[in-house]
Structures are given as C-alpha cells and as structure tokens.
Image: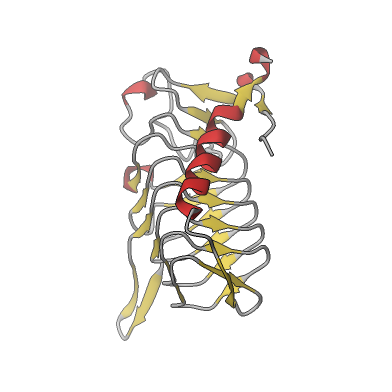
Amino acid sequence: MELCEILYNKAEYIETASGNKVSRQSVLCGSQNIVLNGKVSFLFFISPCSFPQLCDNCVKCPLFFQTIVMNDCIIRGDLANVRVGRHCVIKSRSVIRPPFKKFSKGVAFFPLHIGDHVFIEEDCVVNAAQIGSYVHIGKNCVIGRRCVLKDCCKILDNTVLPPETVVPPFTVFSGCPGLFSGELPECTQELMIDVTKSYYQKFLPLSQI
C-alpha cells in the first residue's frame, strides 16, 4: 500500500539550503553532541532556547543534512554523544536518551548509536546502547537501559524491553517484558529502505499540494 502524503505547515519549520526541515517547538539537549549522518528524516522538534544556533546561518551547521524534525521529541545529547545514521525517522513524543551504568563512585553515561533506515514510532523511550540498521520500533515502546538491537529486527507496539536485552537479527520482540515472538523475512532490509525513503519523500509542505 502506497504511503499518503504527510503534510506540515511550512511556517512552523526552519528550512535550510541543504534540505533540513526543523520545527520550532521542542527540545534538543546538547546539540554539539548529536551527529546525524547523511539524509536523515528526523521527527523531533527543537525549541530555539535549546538550540540557539538555529538561525539564518544554520545552513552551515554540520549536525543536520536533509533532516525532518517533528513534534515533542527529546534527544539528550547533553548526557553523551548520540549518533544517528541515514534515512531515519523518529516520530512524535519520543525520547532518545544515552544509556547509563552505575558504579561505586557514581553514574556514567555512554554513547548511543543508531544505524541507517531506522523507524521509531510515536511515544517511545529509547535508552539503548546500540540500534542497528533497518530496525522498526513500534508505538509506545520502552527500550531499556543498554539494550542492543541488531540489524533487521522489529519491536512491536507497547513492548517493554528489559535492561541489557539483545535482540538478534531478523527477529520480532513483543510484550512486557519483551520476548521473542516471531521472525522477519530475508527482504527486511529492502523493505525498511523503501519505508524510510518513502516517508521522507512524502513529507511535504502544504504549499506543494
């Protein structure tokens, strides 16, 4: 089934010469520690106070390239580095937060790496150590502390993964706690590439319709 157009109000976004579409409404903490590689379709909002360098000169900013930033997400780059691959989609009200580990002398945060063609639905909390490429995370999921999601896996809606869970390639996890519930086809990589690229292409300003 073909994806319908996703329309947005152009007045609510900052658009740069390199194709970034950044909403003016939410929170990006520690933007100097957030690296988005390549053509990323990123759905989180940024408030001007949390990202002061978003201005008329933001075309020079190295953090974004053809990025879409939608509503009410939070990315905690102030805790540790967050690196996101190409053609990723992070939808509304999701929280991306680097993982932490408790030591006798305190708490340490570690970098969070997200691969290419990753689709994260609404209302998720991601506290993983690593998310591979071609991964789909359903709505209202909690990805626990220091989880590792391998390439080509799927987390169904409303799943809660316990801390340090490892999700193997081509598997489906669901439930609370999240457990193995199925397998994915060998064409998962191609399917995720198609989904994420199509979403970016269908994200259009109202003036183009």
Which image quadrant for residue 105? bottom left
Q: Quadrant of the C terminus?
A: top right
Q: Residue at x 47, y 46 (%)?
A: 190
Which image quadrant for residue 181? bottom right
Instruction: From the viewer's perspective, tell me whether residue 72 is left or right of residue 39.
Output: right
Q: Residue at x 41, y 67 (%)?
A: 99
Chosen colour scheme: secondary structure
Number of numbered discs visible in the structure rendering: 0
Residue 152, position in %: x, y?
Answer: 46, 59
Work out which residue is located at the far front of the displayed protein and give it: 186
Q: Residue at x 61, y 80 (%)?
A: 177
72 in relation to 133, above or below: above
Residue 204 in view here: yes
Residue 43 in view here: no
12 in relation to 123, above or below: above
Q: Residue at x 47, y 43 (%)?
A: 193
Residue 162, position in %: x, y?
Answer: 53, 78
113 in relation to 173, above or below: above
Q: Quadrant of the N terminus?
A: top right
Work out which residue is located at the far bottom of the displayed protein and give it: 104
Residue 22, position in %: x, y?
Answer: 51, 30
Residue 154, position in %: x, y?
Answer: 55, 62
Which image quadrant for residue 136? bottom right
